[in-house]
Image: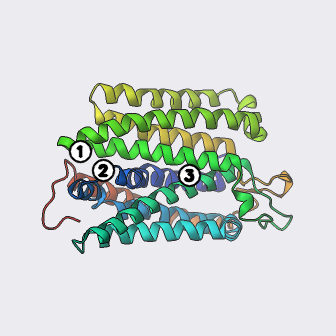
Amino acid sequence: MTFDLNTIWFILVGVLFTGYAMLDGFDLGIGALHLFTKKDEERRVLLNSIGPVWDGNEVWLVTAGGALFAAFPNVYATVFSGFYLAFYLLLASLIFRAVAIEFRSKQPMFWWRQMWDIGFAGGSILSSLLLGVALGNIAQGVPVDERGEFAGTFLGLLQPYPLLVGITTVALFMMHGAIYGVMKTEGELHDKIRRWAMNAIIFFVICAATTTMATLLYIPHIAARVRDNPWLFSIVLANMLAIANIPREFHRGKDWLAFLSSCATIITLMLLFGLNQYPYMVYSLPNPENSLTIHNAASSSRTLETMLIIAGIGVPIVIAYTVCIYWIFRGKVKIDRMSY
């Protein structure tokens, strides 16, 4: 790996998407678990556990999309035009989920709150699934013609492997969200979420093992990259240790360490994805020669230099804002008149 401007931007885009997955992942996980409890007060607690941070977490997605557009405009054009319907569904689910959070407690009627509860949970699950399906398609490869344009169909994106990655992503976010929920709640709801978390951990481990085997068996270019670079197994080992440490710390009652291990799981998974993709941004299947790489899909060197300066100013601000918000709203959730 040569650390030129193109590689630096590849890493920066990966860091931003990883930050989004790590932060908004537990938001989406809380949403996926939202309907497991039937009591109105408990659902309000779940909403307020993410209430101060969910919109800030989504800033990472906007920032990552902007960085992708600035650094690799050809990739942005190919992916967003080829995955247009999928991204439209993702955008609609994220918007509907956000509206549900804001509107849910505006009226006291049962049917009103139930409608928005279903919208919140459905939007969270669909968002997680679509993000995973998109990631699975990028890993597997998509048809790209000689002009660098997507040559497939929407239904062609819904193949078994991308769907498996999508389900694994839902499982990962449910586990991540359940552990976060345990840290933010107390009493009866805390005990409920602790049980959900153990089931979510089991669900994720099964999905992760299945996806790993499917990747090595059915995605030949990734399997070849791992065989040719044995040092990648060190990242695989780190990922396995992070996953194994989640139930260990959780069983010991160290929920914060379990949450950090869940974060480490996401980081190592995204690191493996990036290392296996490099230098490809969009791998073309079945014609690898049409692939978009960090070199043939990048902006000019002058643009990359200018944007790197801007990123050097903007990214620390985003990080500082995120740290500040989490520090201010640390601790257990308390319901008051200003709550959702």
- Pair 3/2: label in front: 2
In the rendering, at what x and y percent does residue 129 appear?
Answer: 55, 54
The residue at the point 76 percent across, 56 percent down is: 142
Residue 14: mark in rendering = 3
Return the residue nearer the eye: 300 or 49.
49
Which residue has dot 1 on it?
189
| Contact (Cβ within 8 Å) of mark 3 with mark 2 | no
- Pair 1/3: label in front: 1
Residue 77 can be seen, yes or no: yes
Task: Identify residue type, mark 2.
Answer: Thr
- Pair 1/2: label in front: 2
Residue 324 can be seen, yes or no: no
**SS for tag 1?**
helix
**SS for tag 2?**
loop
Badge 2: residue crowd in 10 Å (few <14, some 14–19, many ≥20): some
Task: Identify residue type, mark 1.
Answer: Leu
237 left or right of 263 in image:
right
Q: In whole angstroms, how far apart are the C-alphas of marks 1 and 3?
A: 35 Å
Which of pointers 1 and 2 lies earlier in the amino acid sequence?
A: 2
Which of pointers 3 and 2 lies earlier in the amino acid sequence?
A: 3
The residue at the point 15 percent across, 54 percent down is: 334
Task: Identify residue type, mark 3.
Answer: Gly
Q: In whole angstroms, how far apart are the C-alphas of marks 3 and 2?
A: 35 Å
The residue at the point 62 percent across, 45 percent down is: 164
Which residue has dot 2 on it?
37
